[in-house]
Image: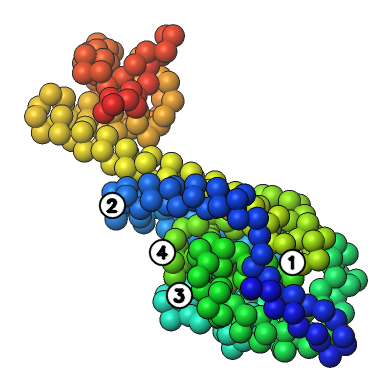
Amino acid sequence: MIRKVITDVYEDVHFSDKYDREQIGLLLRELDVRHSHFTNLPIVPEVRKFLTGELFVSSVFSTAAIGKPDIEEQDVRNFLSGNDHELSELQSRFVNNIRRTFEFIEKNHNNFELNTENIIKLHIMFTIDTSEGLPGVYRSKDRSAVNTDYKPPIGSMDELTAEFCNWFSSSDMQNHHPAIRAFLAHYHLGMLQPFSNGNGRTARAVEALIFTNAGMPYIPHVLSQYYKRNNKDYIKAFIKNEKTGGFDMTPFLIFCLEGSVRAYKLITDMAVTGLRAISVREYIRKLRSMKKITERQKDLLEIIYSYDKPFDLHELLTNPVFAGLYRNVTENTARNDIKRMKELNLIVFEADKCCFNRFVLG
């Protein structure tokens, strides 16, 4: 459905769900298949905790870095973990607002309705105490000087935002795939730019709420990284849409859906890696309980699995990583440990060095 609105300064503004069904349909099918594969993985609590924690931190940094490129990732990580950092007071408030907004999304996505009150609430959460204009107050000035790539509407921001929400809530829009709804909401809020600042964060937060409500909570966090790493293409996708007159959403949807497919590849790889690590640790403990390896050999296997670098006999005896295990034993003992692990196919040799056999479980 395409809705046309004429503002108080006689601008034509369109809200459109038109796109190339064939191109977008192929990407949606791939997204659904990858979503199904991921949801069928046995995501145990330990893996879920890792996914949630790592993706959350990366997402906060990426969202912050889009608006403030001078922010360093390690400083954000240190700030979020309560460690020493070099963020300024203003940067700290900026990052903390993003963290609190993401936490709000996680807790309230089931009860969220896309309306003007909630859009204003999200904007306030992002911009409070950051010297970014008036939090939650619609802009009244032209942004042509700021937006040199495309021209957002000038007048009636309150009316246009209300019209957008009404359009989004229509039965036609509700029938779309959740990803299409999320990206159309993202695009149209980004196109309107109803506030003087923080519009991108607000638009992406609405996108995240829709995805999370649809049972895809990890995707928005990976998309934050995707938008940050591909920022020029992100802007180009908006421009390509605008060049169609604002009717054809295909360029923006293709860009975002390609990012979603990549996101599922990433989180699936992360989950499988985590599950394999758990399985390997359990296998090592089982070998110990069956007395096929000694306690020292068990500890060594756990170390070299995490160490993930080739090593030789000399390093076993001298590298601080292994020092606690081999400080008080002979070279022959270390040699026998290597021999035993080779017999059990737990290590493989590369040239003159060996490393953990990551395919020991198949």
Q: Residue at x 87, y 85 (%)?
A: 10
- Mark 3 vs mark 4: give the one in front: 4
Pick whichever of labels 3 and 4 is earlier in the sequence. 3
| Numbered marks: total | 4
Q: Looking at the picture, which amino acid does disc 3 mark? A: His
Q: Nearer the viewer, residue 141 or 154?
A: 154
Apparent side of residue 348 relative to residue 212 in the rendered image (left or right) = left
Check the image and name the residue furthest to the left.
290
Calculate the distance from the C-alpha at mark 3 to the C-alpha at mark 2. Answer: 23 Å
Q: Callout 2: few (<14), some (14-19), or many (20+) C-alpha neighbours within 10 Å? A: few
In x, y percent, where is residue 159?
A: 72, 89
Judged from the image, the secondary structure of the residue bearing numbered disc 1 is: loop
Of callouts 2 and 4, the N-terminal one: 2
Disc 4 to disc 1, C-alpha distance = 29 Å
Which of the two marks, 3 or 2, is nearer to us in this view?
3
Question: What residue would you read off at disc 4?
Answer: 215
For this view, does 340 lie left or right of residue 110? left
Label whose residue precedes the other's in the sequence (4 or 1)? 4
The vertical placement of 361 against 129, above or below, is: above
Mark 3: few/some/many CA within 10 Å (<14, 14-19, 20+): some
* Crowd band around label 4 with a 10 angstrom C-alpha radius: few (<14), some (14–19), many (20+): few
What residue is shown at x 43% (from left), y 81% (from top)?
Answer: 111
Residue tagged 2? 44
Task: Estimate the x, y position of residue 14 in percent, counting from the top left.
Answer: 74, 75
Between 82 and 239, the residue placed more toward the observer is: 239
Tag 1: amino acid = Phe
What sort of colour scheme is used for the picture?
Answer: rainbow
Q: Is residue 195 visible?
A: no
